[in-house]
């Protein structure tokens, strides 16, 4: 069985954590499955090869999509390419698990939805399975996007909006169909690894920035002026209470640039740039708390019972903090120094962590999600 894991990469630690979450479940439950990854700059060959992934050869360039050609090529030729070179084509793949996280909506280029919809319809036409794993979906307001999604999503094998807003965005387009079911982020079953270099975690508060907070994707423009100032004030509030603020870069150069701005504002701080997402989750799980703008940083904290303050640039953050019963732990862009100080006090006192019942509830839903997939694909 060949399974393509779509929408993942190795720069964004959340996307890579989702990749590991899928691999761990497949190894546990469908050991005969072989994973397939699509080559791209954020997913280089060396990293794909370390996972034993087969390499997908795609006949697509921007709006030109010729992947239907792969179904017309002789199977003997395709088998030879796979055995000799580890190369597969769309026609070889039995199941697509789309773990894009957040890629389909008005915040992103229309071509991304166009490509996904074309793949979904080809999969249905050729007897393949296409599952959109739990992810944020929408808002969808562009006419062409709406037309394509109305045509494609009813033909997907399963569609899993990650929270209520995404569920509403999808069902408003295509109706409340049986194969569209809401499930939470599925990285909550992944166990982190604590690296030896991270010590005295109970004295440390992680600050995890996100460049999207000050990008054009964020419709709340107040953040453009206040974001670095707010994080810097949080750093000072942590220091004032005798704890050690530590910056953690969750994704690449853009987030690093914000880390450097904070350091320029408040003085020298430890900056962690850990490549392994399992270790990132381990570091989060061993800390006193986090002040976080990266979705999967927030998820990694909340699902381990770690106190978490968050910021939001899109609806998925509000819904996440609502689910875990800590909506009051989202920082607002116009927060005063006094309000931030009070929220940091809440964090350090343990008041910004969810109760164990919610953590176990969402883990059980993730297990239910995987069983739903297995039932649908006959495994």
Image (cartoon, rainbow, N blue to C red):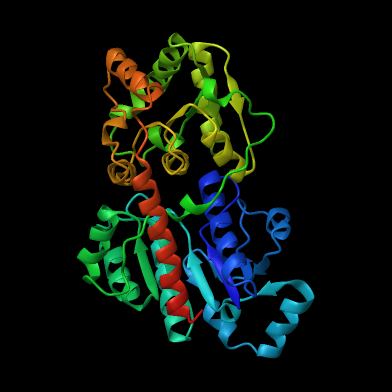
Q: Quadrant of residue 306?
A: top left
| Residue drawn at (63%, 61%) of the image | 39
Single out the residue that lies furthest toward the top.
240
Single out the residue that lies furthest toward the front.
357
Where is residue 311? Give x, y as percent: 35, 33
Where is residue 1? Give x, y as percent: 61, 78
Side of 5 relative to 220 (left or right): right
| Residue drawn at (58%, 13%) of the image | 268
Q: Is residue 119 visible?
A: no
Where is residue 34? Give x, y as percent: 64, 71
Q: Quadrant of residue 30?
A: bottom right
Where is residue 149? Give x, y as percent: 31, 69
Q: Quadrant of residue 257?
A: top right
| Residue drawn at (28%, 13%) of the image | 338
| Residue drawn at (68%, 29%) of the image | 197
* Nearer to the camera, 165 or 374: 374
* Nearer to the camera, 342 or 91: 342
Note whether 313 is above or below 336 in the view shown: below
Note whether 178 is above or below 74 in the view shown: above
């Amino acid at each position: 069985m060949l399974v393509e894991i779509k929408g993942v990469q190795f720069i964004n630690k959340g996307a890579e954590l989702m990749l590991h979450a899928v691999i761990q479940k497949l190894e546990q439950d469908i050991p005969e499955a072989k994973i397939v990854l699509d080559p791209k700059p954020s997913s280089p060959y060396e990293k794909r090869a370390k996972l034993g992934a087969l390499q997908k050869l795609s006949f697509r360039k921007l709006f030109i999509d010729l992947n239907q050609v792969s179904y017309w090529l002789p199977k003997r030729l395709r088998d030879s390419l796979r055995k000799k070179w580890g190369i597969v084509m769309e026609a070889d793949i039995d199941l697509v698990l789309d773990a894009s996280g957040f890629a389909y909506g008005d915040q992103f280029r229309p071509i991304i939805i166009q490509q996904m919809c074309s793949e979904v319809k080809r999969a249905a036409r050729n007897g393949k399975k296409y599952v959109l794993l739990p992810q944020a979906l929408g808002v969808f307001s562009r006419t062409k996007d709406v037309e394509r999604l109305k045509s494609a999503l009813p033909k997907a094998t399963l569609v899993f909006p990650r929270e209520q807003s995404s569920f509403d965005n999808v069902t408003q387009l295509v109706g409340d169909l049986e194969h569209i079911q809401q499930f939470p982020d599925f990285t909550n079953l992944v166990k982190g690894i604590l690296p030896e270099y991270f010590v005295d975690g109970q004295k440390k508060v992680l600050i995890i920035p996100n460049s999207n907070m000050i990008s054009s994707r964020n419709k709340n423009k107040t953040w453009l002026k206040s974001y670095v100032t707010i994080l810097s004030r949080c750093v000072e509030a942590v220091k004032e209470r005798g704890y050690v603020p530590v910056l953690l870069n969750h994704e690449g150069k853009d987030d690093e640039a914000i880390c450097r701005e904070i350091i320029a504002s408040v003085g020298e701080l430890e900056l962690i740039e850990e490549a392994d997402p399992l270790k990132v989750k381990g570091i989060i799980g061993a800390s006193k708390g986090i002040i976080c703008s990266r979705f999967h940083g927030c998820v990694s904290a909340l699902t381990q019972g770690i106190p978490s303050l968050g910021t939001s640039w899109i609806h998925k953050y509000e819904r996440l903090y609502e689910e875990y019963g800590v909506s009051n732990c989202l920082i607002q862009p116009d927060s005063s120094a006094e309000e931030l100080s009070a929220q940091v006090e809440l964090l350090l006192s343990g008041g910004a962590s969810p109760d164990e019942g919610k953590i176990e509830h969402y883990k059980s839903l993730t297990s239910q999600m995987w069983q739903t997939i297995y039932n649908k694909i006959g495994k």
